[in-house]
Amino acid sequence: MATSAVEHAAPDAPAAHSKTGVWSWITTVDHKRIGIMYGVSAFVFFMFGGLEALLLRIQLGSADNTFLSPDVYNQLFTMHGTTMIFLGVMPLSAMFFNFMIPLQIGARDVVFPRLNSFSFWMFLVGAIVLNVSFLFNAAPNAGWFGYANLTETQYSPGLNTDFWVIGLMALGVASLAAAVNFFVTIINMRAPGMRLLRMPMFVWMSFITQVLLLLAFPIITVALIFLMADRYFGANFFQPDANGDPMLWQHLFWIFGHPEVYILILPPFGIVSEILPVFSRKPLFGYAAMVFSGAFIAVLGFGVWSHHMFATGMGPIADASFGLLTLLIAIPTGVKIFNWIGTIWGGSLQMKTPMYFALGFIAMFIIGGLSGIMHAAVPADLQQTDTYFVVAHFHYVLFGGSIFALLAGAYYWMPKMFGFMLNERIGKIQFWLMFIGFNITFFPMHFLGLHGMPRRVYTYPEGLGFEFWNLIETAGSMLLGFSFLVFIWNIWLSKRAGVAAPADPWDGATLEWSIPSPPQEFNFAEIPTVHARDPLWEQKRSQGRPLPEPPRVSGEGIHLPNPSVKPLITALGIGVFFTGFLLGSPWPIPASLTINLPVVLIGFAMTAYGILSWAFEPA
Amino acid sequence: MRFRSIAIGRLLWWSPLLTLLVLVAAGCAENYPQTTLDPRGEFARMVDDVFMTTVRWAILVFVLVEGALVVAIIKFRGKPDDPEPKQIHGSSVLEVVWTVIPAVILVMVAIPTIKVIFETAKEPADAMVVEVIGHQWWWEFRYPEYGITTANEMYVPVDRTVDLRMVSDDVVHSFWVPQFAAKRDVFPNRETRMWFNTEVTGEFPGQCAEFCGIQHARMGFRVVSVEVAEFDSWVAGMSAATEPVSVEGDSVALAGQQLFLTKACIGCHSFNAAAPPPGQIGPNLANIGSRTMIAAGMLENTDENMARWISDPQGYKEGSLMVIAGEITEAELAALVAYLRAQQVVASPPVVADIQ
């Protein structure tokens, strides 16, 4: 027995400790490194999406502007939405899932480390497919919602929509694989004593998010396959002339699309629920209510999709039902907001940068929530839908909400992830620039929408009164964009200053603060045993604050999974397979074949090789 | 140092508010003819009432909740060496209270919501039917009672309910004329309906509200609400409009008439409002000279704009189906403009009502 363990450990040792070089990153199965790769690439795409937004804002800065051509504008607004959702906010959450879930539940890694690596590479493949379209001046241009039948070849003959369909399919594979992984990880890998109702709130909200991903992504995948069949093989799912139905697309899209909104906001809810107690030095108010309200929001999230479709004329019964269900969501959401305020009430607030962003999140999310109630009032929505009022609403939820919370998370956890402290003063300056820039950019959109400015318009004529607020918004958006340069500057400066982060810089409550910053590859030298919620606070209470700095240990004999390149090969294979759908047929016959069969087959072979060799590779 | 940073912090707290106040004051001075906030018809008014109900509750909730947040931030600001605050894990009483109070508010919002949903869904009585056909990127309006077809300009008699029967010729559009009614999507494979009435005369802008391709931004229209007598004379004029308005005696316009035939305009456009020839894919041009707007409600109908539009339709509206066959000289352009501007079946509609 003992000999076999040694034999097993021996070949691991060199791989586990060769920690530098590009190859070590490419083959890594370490959840922390994968998390960092998610974070870095998501931030790069997030900056792309922001740049796209700034170009849109310049175009809208004056009436009848010709800065962007109509088609380029449509490509940019489509890619802005698609990028921010699928390549920005989702993978930024995935960064924290990867890095923090195993640490918070006291595990050495996720349950399927190689699948985790595959998820990341698959995400990158999808992201590249989507963005490479710009090089062909064929970026998707039918909106992130891709309403049929505009997306049929008859009305969208170019590759634009093909890039969109295929990119989203690839991203869907990545999301589903990751969701399976984290779902099982949270169920199975918790440290002894960490019962479900002792899990940190971020883990809870992440867990609910994985359930949403598992249920919602198959639906969009079905819809995309239908659309692909229409576009490539002459099927008629959404072709009205052949008794297909554009409404079918809308239903399928929003049955995915509304849960997707909660996929974007629940992890940020979790992040804020971690930060507020720590910086208030007081436990989360109403833990159980926070868990159940999150779950309730997720369940309701599958029953309100048609509130995106009130203008389609579904009839009064459907309108009333979906309106009422939507109003109902305000109750658990309200509970969350009140419990957050209850958490800081009576606390001893330590006004560090993460706290600024977390409080900014609450303040902004309230506004987004209230305009959400206005949309649930169906008749009012009939005026607001497809106007800038909606644009204002969801930016208050997804920027004022998600992005503020993700930045709070970044300032909170980056010392743990990278081992250096971020500059507090610059962090607060960034907060104020972002807070002011955000409000100048998005608050006037409420006015513009109510005064009749539709969304998704590349320009507007003079005489409708839209010039003034649009110009203000454009100015605000520049400030907002600038605030992210300050963020990058802060990281660069702080890294250079190199103020080492202790294991527990914030007097944290959860297990990730019990190990050195940055964590060692195996996370925990010894798997902790959990006796209560906020396990680290519990430990400090019994042993006295502050705990001694945990030593860095050799980790001899701890078995870690081997690095593997097979997940990357599999992801690339799927990428090549999909690329075959974008290259066009190499043969003139049959004329109806619009795919490149050789490339598709090579991709298929690569994928098959990747999966098989992966299956037989020793872990 | 510490004192200075607090002072700057205070200033930063207030600066967004002050800026906002100045900006709102400036923004209110603008004129918004496409606004949803100044309803001029029953449908839009009912919708506005629901909206204002939600606004009142929202402001109340906003003030209370943001207020509580700000109070908490100011009141409970601590120092690192402060003693640990009392560890409170929750309060069942409070949590029930802040579940029930929002629920009550939501009921207050739900009641008018449901009421108006059903009221606006009622079949309108004694209504004038107008068929709306959405095209990429213009609007066709047909009056089955009068056998009239027109484009981008919907004449309606004031105080009469209009019953819209809508269908799309291509992709999904959305019909929206904010001061009279809200939005209703227009589908290629089924009829959608909405009604509205106008309480004032005047000309009101509307616009497609569902993304429908490259020129979604330039798919506008006008609703022209006129007195009944004026509407009747419009109907009379349009029902008789089977031929272009004669331009005899105007040599420039006559040349334009010839060009209309030779420059391929005639392939897509007709001046016959009463019995337009089937299969024409462009907007009907009867009465084009009297319309206030051209290019689907986007350009004011002046000689210059007409010249700009027809000399380079792709320049103004890239992707539209309109093209000019071959080169066009300045003189030819002037002739075409003169001809089109002379196509006045009825006198020009009233100027845009002062709605401020």
Image (cartoon, coloured by chain):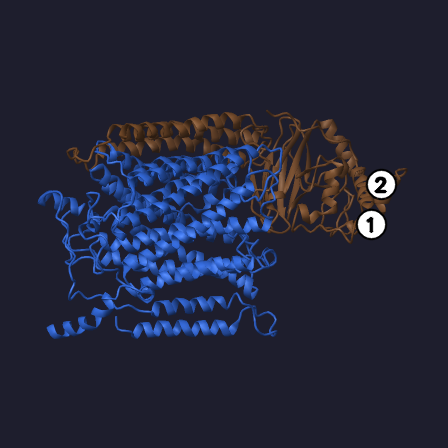
Chain colours: A blue, B brown
Asked whether A338 or A219 is in front, the reply is A338
Q: State the image quarter where residue A403 is shown.
A: top left
Q: Return the chain for callout 1.
A: B
Quarter the C terminus of chain B occupies? top right
Check chain identity for marks 2 and 1: say if they share one: yes
Circles 2 and 1: CB atoms closer than 8 Å: no
Residue B161 is left or right of residue A307, and the answer is right
Q: How many marks?
A: 2
Residue ID at (40%, 41%): A483
Asked whether B105 or A139 is in front, the reply is A139
> In this figure, which residue is indicated by the disc labeled 1?
B261
Q: Is residue A255 visible?
A: no
Residue B72 is left or right of residue A51, and the answer is left
Residue A159 is left or right of residue A195, and the answer is right
Question: Amino acid under label 1?
Answer: Leu
Secondary structure under tag 1 reads helix
In the rendered image, the vertical position of residue A11 relative to residue B4, given as above or below: below
Asked whether A462 or A383 is in front, the reply is A462
Which comes before the other along the chain, label 2 or label 1? Answer: 2
Question: Amino acid under label 2?
Answer: Ala
Q: Position of residue A19 (x, y in %)?
A: 26, 64
Quarter the N terminus of chain B occupies? top left
Task: Residue lying at the far right in this picture: please name it.
Answer: B249
Mark 2 nearby-residue class (10 Å; few <14, some 14–19, many ≥20): many
In the rendered image, the vertical position of residue B251 relative to residue A127, given as above or below: above
Q: State the image quarter where residue A107 is shown.
A: bottom left
Asked whether B191 or A366 is in front, the reply is A366
> In this figure, which residue is indicated by the disc labeled 2?
B253
